[in-house]
Image (spheres, coloured by chain):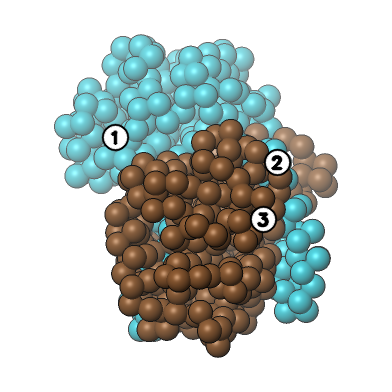
Chain colours: A cyan, B brown
Amino acid sequence: MTIAIIGLGLIGGSLALSLRQHGLARRLVGLEANADYGRRALALGLVDEIAPDLPAAVAGADLIVVAVPMDALLTVLPQVLDLLTGRQVVLDVGSTKAQLLAAVATHPRRGRFVAAHPMAGTEFSGPDAAVRGLFEGKNVVLCETEASDADALALVEDLLRALPMRVLRLGAAEHDLHVAYVSHLAHLTSFALALTVLKKERGGEPRIFDLAGGGFASAVRLAKSAPTTWVPIFRQNRDNLLDVLDEHLHQLHTLRALLADEDYEGLTDALHQANEIQKIIP
Amino acid sequence: MTIAIIGLGLIGGSLALSLRQHGLARRLVGLEANADYGRRALALGLVDEIAPDLPAAVAGADLIVVAVPMDALLTVLPQVLDLLTGRQVVLDVGSTKAQLLAAVATHPRRGRFVAAHPMAGTEFSGPDAAVRGLFEGKNVVLCETEASDADALALVEDLLRALPMRVLRLGAAEHDLHVAYVSHLAHLTSFALALTVLKKERGGEPRIFDLAGGGFASAVRLAKSAPTTWVPIFRQNRDNLLDVLDEHLHQLHTLRALLADEDYEGLTDALHQANEIQKIIP
């Protein structure tokens, strides 16, 4: 089948590589708002052609994947649905779902759309960040599948399982709360950690990073992520993220109090509790 | 030369592997408070023999490396210095330095001791966590070198450079402040992040971790670290860590306010600033 990918960054580009690798697309058509990115995606062989505009990208595609930042997605997804004819199917790969699903809830072609969030990524962005195998063995969450047509859902599920990904289903509200915990908070704390240490370095301690080891590198990895990707995510998941951030601040204040009070038994207990993450994320 | 390693965990065990790999030790003698760890270190071939006690470990060793947790180090290091005869040299590998150096400042054999902190580690512990090449190409900080005898310092520097490591020198106070920023804070925030998400999961959201990707794994990696290692470090670097944690809390509160106020331009600016970490930690 012919697949159009709107947005050829890390996720759209990596998906193009995976679709080609698994023989799932006869032809890949791309569209990219950034002309340099579009040329680069073509040069990298991510897609077979770059469409001149959205109508051209959608026309003739059996499946249209919308892989643009979350703010653009709120505009682009309804436009794509407006352009659909026949049995075309639309898939998104966005990191938040409630606002997006609300925006297209009453669209006459809502049934052709399947809302998906592949739980995969890196801190890099743009077509050069596309990596082979990014989705292999990862989870992908489908949201509000009852609003998708059965054939559209079946096409998307078969495609995702062929990458191969593990398909889960969650309500949009539940999805957005869960990702606030296991993705958005980790990004926000990593940005804050980088800011804390960079501020100290600007304060005249240029050698501070000579002492940074692999642990620090791991903890600040997500702070390299693109603001153009993450500010729209934080914005659309604002209420959940504020709640989750407050819980995190409460945990930090609790650890701070144990240290300030020199309650080292209590601190030891808390760290042992934190160690339980090892059983879940080995 | 014969090298005794007191404490055969991640650091002591990995050092044993490196010393052997680079032909720096004719004979490696170990001492381990945990008898199971001692037997395991012997079975893994980390050391040639396990000494029955501290005097036996020290006797006959040209270099004694003390690689025990920071709380034990405050007791063990003076004991080792008490046992020294002739030109024996002692090296520690502890993560904080000010309290330790104060504890041995007036010891008659202070000159035989070189205070070192290799900037390398993983989240695992015990002899099974020992990994080949852990120190290769990493920085090692020597503190208060003016209090070490010239021959002791030269022996240690030659040995560390042969691993090969890059040798830096810092004052103890400066060292402890810098590691609070680039190591201890990252550990504390990772523990807090794990606690935040685990608490949510215990609240009845067992599927929350299905949505965790590589970003979350990276951010909570340090939360798997052993409390027996980290509580003594946090304790000995308490004052610095409280200051640095307060700066981090300030950064988190600033990001929270930008989000709460829907100041997305300000949030974008802040994340762009955080992105500068990319230039320093590529």
Task: Give how far across and how far down residue B53 sits, in percent.
Answer: 66, 55
Task: Give how far across and how far down residue B185 sits, in percent.
Answer: 56, 67
Q: Nearer the viewer, residue B193 or B40?
A: B40
Between circles 1 and 3, the one closer to the viewer is 3
Left or right: B96 as drawn, with respect to A125: right
Query: Could you tell me which secondary element the residue under label 3 belongs to?
Result: loop
Q: In this rendering, does residue A181 appear at all?
A: no
Sooner in the amino-acid sequence: mark 3 or mark 2? 2
Query: Could you tell me which secondary element the residue under label 1 belongs to?
Result: strand
| Residue at 55% over, 88% down | B106
- Residue type (three-letter) at the residue carrying disc 3: Asp
Q: Quadrant of residue A198?
A: bottom left
Task: Give how far across and how far down residue A126 sits, in percent.
Answer: 31, 44
Q: Nearer the viewer, residue B91 or A21?
A: B91
- Residue type (three-letter) at the residue carrying disc 2: Asp
Left or right: B89 as drawn, with respect to B49: left
Rendered image: mark on residue B36: 2
Rendered image: mark on residue B53: 3
Q: Residues within 10 Å of mark 2 (few under 14, many from 20)?
A: few
Label 3: chain? B
| Residue at 52% over, 33% down | A118
Q: Are marks 1 and 2 in contact (CB under 8 Å)?
A: no
Quadrant of the image containing the C terminus of chain B: bottom left
Label 1: chain? A
- Residue type (three-letter) at the residue carrying disc 1: Leu
Q: Which residue is mark 1?
A: A31
